[in-house]
Amino acid sequence: MLRIAVPNKGSLSEVAAEMLAEAGYSGRRDSRKLVHTDSRNGVEFFYLRPRDIATYVGSGALDVGITGRDLLLDSGSAAREIEPLDFADSTFRFAAPVGSDIGDIAHLAGKRVATSYPKLVDDFLRARGVESTLVKLDGAVESAVQLGVADAVADVVSTGATLKAAGLEIFGPVILESTALLIGGPSDHPDVDRLLRRLRGVLVARKYVIMDYDLPADQLDEATRVAGGIESPTVSPLKDEAWVAVRVMVRADEANQIMDRLYDLGARAILVTAIHAARL
Ligand SMILES: Nc1ncnc2c1ncn2[C@@H]1O[C@H](COP(=O)(O)OP(=O)(O)OP(=O)(O)O)[C@@H](O)[C@H]1O
Ligand SMILES: O=P(O)(O)OC[C@H]1O[C@H](OP(=O)(O)OP(=O)(O)O)[C@H](O)[C@@H]1O
Ligand SMILES: [Mg+2]
């Protein structure tokens, strides 16, 4: 049985549960349940606080887990990154009040910096020889300056809207680029590969679409340059020998530009369909 740690709350939990469902696993129905066994797929899910997941996986108590890179590094656990999962992308940044004279990390010497990720920030500042006083908060860190408990903050930034609303602006270098990860522990469980293949299949199904179109046969080389597929396009004959039918996988975010270019080459009846599951 593969033992998997999944986030029970916060911004990672919903997407992680969706990905696992799309990968064919059953999940808990009651959001208060802490453990769920999917015996058909030979896995057991443990619903844990995202911040604690690296600790369980790093100690070997659980085999793999889903958490953020920032949380993994802040935990100091021996867990390691297996694969990025393409969600919960964020950067970890310093911010100070708009117009303040803190414009560089050197200016943080002797200042108070509020954060929920003290190890991450401490490691970063220490490595650069800056000595600050860290103020450890649980969340809503952006309010710390307005409320007078810190001079600057270090926190997760996505759109930047939370910082802006609190009258703060980013300064200094990027502390970390974070994303959701599959993490593993000290020993490799033989079933991790299957989980990984399934999760990769979900990522492919989300990122790619199938494109079918009819094309004048003499345009095939040109069309293959526009959309070459993973290995190579599937080409089928049509009754009218001057035409062929082509099927190819393309990135979903490029589908419309590719359709425009194929249309200009003479392609017609261009159809795009979603991929439900994939294994490349
Ligand atoms: N606005 C956001 N955009 C993208 N990723 C985010 C965002 N907020 C948090 N994250 C990521 O989610 C993870 C934080 O998990 P956590 O459970 O603390 O989420 P949370 O939404 O902050 O939950 P909580 O309500 O407990 O604070 C980190 O990896 C972090 O980088
Ligand atoms: O750049 P933005 O798009 O505004 O997103 C960043 C904010 O999102 C998260 O907050 P969350 O909602 O998790 O609250 P928290 O601070 O209590 O964790 C994070 O801690 C930032 O505050
Ligand atoms: Mg949060």
Image (cartoon, grey):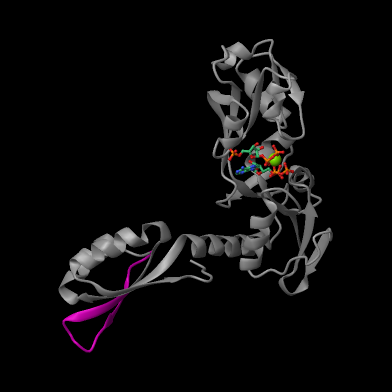
Figure check: 56 above or below 119: below
> Residue 171's x, y, as percent?
54, 22
Q: Residue at x 69, y 61 (%)?
A: 190
Q: Which quadrant would residue 147 be assigned to in this image?
A: top right
Q: In the visual, does 156 lie left or right of 173? A: right
To which quarter of the image does residue 96 belong? top right
Which residue is at 64% across, 20% downward?
A: 125
**Who is closer to the viewer here, 37 or 196?**
37
- Which residue is at a point 71% across and 71% down the rendered structure image? 41
Q: Is residue 234 magenta?
A: yes
- Residue at 71%, 48% (x, y): give it: 10
Position of residue 172 relative to residue 29, above or below, is: above
Q: Position of residue 175 (x, y in %)?
A: 58, 29
Name the quarter where the N terminus is drawn: bottom right
Q: Is residue 173 visible?
A: yes
Decide if residue 227 is in sight here.
Answer: no
Estimate the x, y position of residue 122 in percent, counting from the top left. 69, 23
Residue 110 is situated, as x and y percent measured from the top left of the image, at: 69, 10
Instruction: Give the residues in magenta.
Output: 230-246
Identify the residue at the far bottom of this view: 239
